């Protein structure tokens, strides 16, 4: 009986701690409305079933909603033996003509190398950058990637993204 009370007490403490974390997250959440918060939570919960780097749908009613989205494929994922707990994952990301990828984050460091075409991209707090074939950009872990797009309405673009993240090769995309 005493063990059951101790277990209930520990569970109650865990629920209380989780409640505090959720309340703090709610208070710090950058979204302006409860509907956006519910969408954010849905995005977090559904991230497991989405491809690891494909863009999420753009918000309904936005000009970006009518644009094509990116697609991706993982070409390798390897544990880093000299950095315990970390892996390097390489992903090819295709941007059809005029494709758009809305705001998101990545849990690890990302280096993007443009293989073909032009990519416009903006990281939180920084200017919009335009990157052409052979150029690169870097994203520190957790940085808000405001958007990425192929501004060309005719020609596709392609990049390779090299992630250094936790050793399990994903998920590589997080909601904003």
Image (cartoon, rainbow, N blue to C red):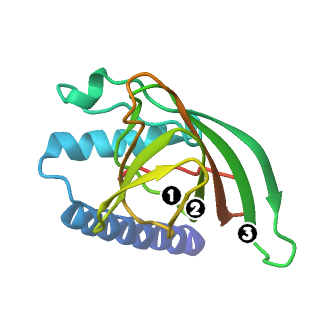
36, above or below 165, in the image: above
**Marks 2 and 3, how far apart in space?**
13 Å
Along the line of sight, the residue nearer the viewer: 74 or 27? 74
The residue pinned by badge 3 equals: 86
Q: Do the residues under discs 1 and 2 have CB atoms within 8 angstroms?
A: yes
Q: Which mark is residue 72?
A: none
Given residues 54 and 34, the one toward you in this image is 54
Residue appearing at x 44%, y 56% in the figure: 105
Q: Secondary structure at mark 1?
A: loop
Question: Which residue was labeled with disc 1?
Answer: 106
**Within-10-Å neighbours for mark 3: few <14, some 14–19, many 20+:** some
Q: Name the quadrant containing residue 82.
A: bottom right
- Horizontally, residue 61 falls left or right of residue 86, namely left
Q: Secondary structure at mark 3?
A: strand
Q: Label 2: state its secondary structure.
A: strand
Q: Residue 153: x percent and y percent?
A: 38, 24
Residue 50 appearing in the image: no
Q: CA distance from mark 3 to mark 1?
A: 14 Å
């Amino acid at each position: 009986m005493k063990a059951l009370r101790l277990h209930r007490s520990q569970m109650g403490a865990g629920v209380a701690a989780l409640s505090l974390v959720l309340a703090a997250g709610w208070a710090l959440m950058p979204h302006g409305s409860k509907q956006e918060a519910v969408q954010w939570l849905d995005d977090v919960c559904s991230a497991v079933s989405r491809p690891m780097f494909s863009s999420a749908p753009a918000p309904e009613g936005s000009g970006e909603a009518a644009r094509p989205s990116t697609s991706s494929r993982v070409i390798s994922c390897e544990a880093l033996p000299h950095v315990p707990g970390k892996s390097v994952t390489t992903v090819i990301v295709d941007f059809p003509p005029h494709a758009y990828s809305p705001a998101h984050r990545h849990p690890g460091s990302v280096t993007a190398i443009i293989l073909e075409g032009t990519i416009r991209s903006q990281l939180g707090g920084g200017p919009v950058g335009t990157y052409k074939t052979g150029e690169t950009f870097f994203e520190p872990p957790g940085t808000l990637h405001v958007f990425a797009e192929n501004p060309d309405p005719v020609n596709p673009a392609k990049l390779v993204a090299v992630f250094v993240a936790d050793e399990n090769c994903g998920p590589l995309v997080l909601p904003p």
